[in-house]
Amino acid sequence: MSLMSGAGQGNRYHSLSILLHWSIVLGLMFMFASGLYMVYADISRADQFRLFQIHKASGVIMLWAILLRIGVRIFTKAPAALDALTPTENLQAKLGHTALYIALITMPLSGWLMVSASPFGLPTLVFVDWINWPHVPGVARNKAIETIANNVHWITAISLATLILGHISAVVWHKKKHKINLLKRMWWSKQ
Amino acid sequence: MMNALVGKLTRLRYAGLFVALCIVSASVYALNTYTVDNKGSKVGFSGEHVGMKFSGVFEKWQADLVLPPHSNPSITASFDLRSAKTGDFTYDTALLEGDWFDVKNHPQGSFVSDSVEMIDGGFKVSGQLTLRGFSKTQTFFLKQTGNKLSANFAINRLDYRIGYDSDPEAEWVGQDIMMILDLETQ
C-alpha cells in the first residue's frame, strides 16, 4: 500500500470521521437522555423549560456535527468493503449506514422545524447567547407543521435507536462470524 | 373724592378677585392636565413563567391625563409593544412573536378611559385596554401621592389572546399579568 493512498489510513476512516463518529455517539447519548427526560420525567416546569432550551441548543450543534460528518464522508475515501462478506451482505451494510446517516440528519432537522413552527416562538440560543439560531422561515405558528415535525422527530428517534442497535449488533456479529474487529476502522489503530 | 377713591378701590378689588379666580381655575385646569412618558415614569408588567416571576417595562409610551376636578376628565395612553423589555433575551424575543404581542400586526397598545372618578386617595379609572386588536374594559385604582400616580392591576392575558395557541391552559405562563404604572406628573 502506498503512502499516498493510505498513510496508515487505508483500512480506517478519515481522522475527522473518527473524531466526529465518537463525538456524535456522546452527543446522541445526551440528546436521547435529555429528550426523554424533559418529556417524561417528573420535574418542575422551570427545569423542564431549561432542559428544552438546552436540548434545542445541543440539537443545533448536533446538526453542524452531522453535516460536517456527511461532508467528510463524501469527500474522503471510506475503507474498502469486507472481502469476507457476500455482495448482498455488503449491500446491506451500505444500506444500513445510509439509513443511519438519514436518521441522524432527520433528527435535528425535524427538531428545528418543530421549534420554528411552534406558536411559543422561543428563540434557540446556542452557547448560552452567543448565537441566536434562526427559525426555519415560513412556518411560524403553524401547528399542523409542528405536529408533523414532532411525529417525525419521535419516529426518527425510535428508528435511529433501532438502527444503532443493529449497527452495534453488526460489529459484534462480524467479530464472531468473520473474526473481524470493525472497531479498528473507527479508531486510530495500527492494522 | 373719598367716595370716588373707595369706589375705585372696590372695583380694583373685584377686578383683582376676578383675576385671582382666573388664575386659580387655570391652575386647577393646568395642575390636573398632564402629558407623561417614559422619562421619570414607568409603565411595566409582571407575571409568572414556569413558576418564576418575570417583569418588564415598556420603553416607549405616552399618556395624556386630564384628572378631576376637571369637568371632562380622561386618560389616554399608547405604548409601543416592540419596546417591551424584560432583561431576558429569550423573553424579549418571544414576546414580539405572533402568538404573544404580535407586533408585526399590532405594534401599538392603547388605553382610553370611559370614566375617571375622584375617590379617596386617588381616582377610580375605567376604560378600554386594547392589545393585539382586542379591547377589554379594565377598571383600576389610580393612587395619588403628591405628584405621583400609581396603579397595580391584573389583566387576563387570554382576554387578549396572548399566548392563546401556545399555552391556553396557563401551564407555562401565568394567566394573570400585573400592569404596573408609576407616573410622575412634574
Image (cartoon, coloured by chain):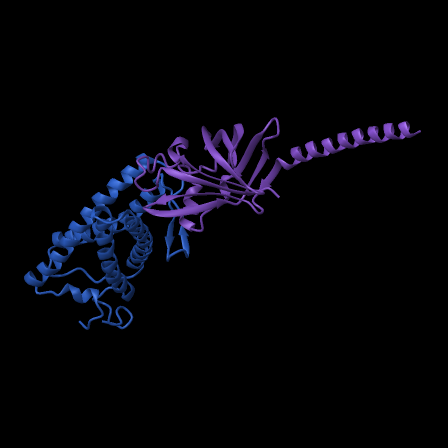
Chain colours: A blue, B purple
* Residue B169 drawn at (x, y percent): 30, 35
In this picture, is B135 found above or below A90? Answer: above
In this picture, is A128 found above or below B129? Answer: below
Residue closer to the observer: B56 or A10: B56
* Residue A1 drawn at (x, y percent): 22, 71
Residue at image x 37%, y 47%? Answer: B53
The quadrant of the picture occupied by the N terminus of chain B is top right
The quadrant of the picture occupied by the C terminus of chain B is top right
Residue closer to the observer: B131 or A185: B131
Residue at image x 50%, y 36%? Answer: B142
* Residue A103 drawn at (x, y percent): 23, 49
Residue at image x 17%, y 59%? Answer: A81
Q: Is residue B15 visible?
A: yes
Residue found farthest to the left: A177
Residue closer to the observer: A121 or B27: B27
Residue found farthest to the front: B2
* Residue B6 drawn at (x, y percent): 86, 30
Left or right, B123 with respect to A96, comes to right
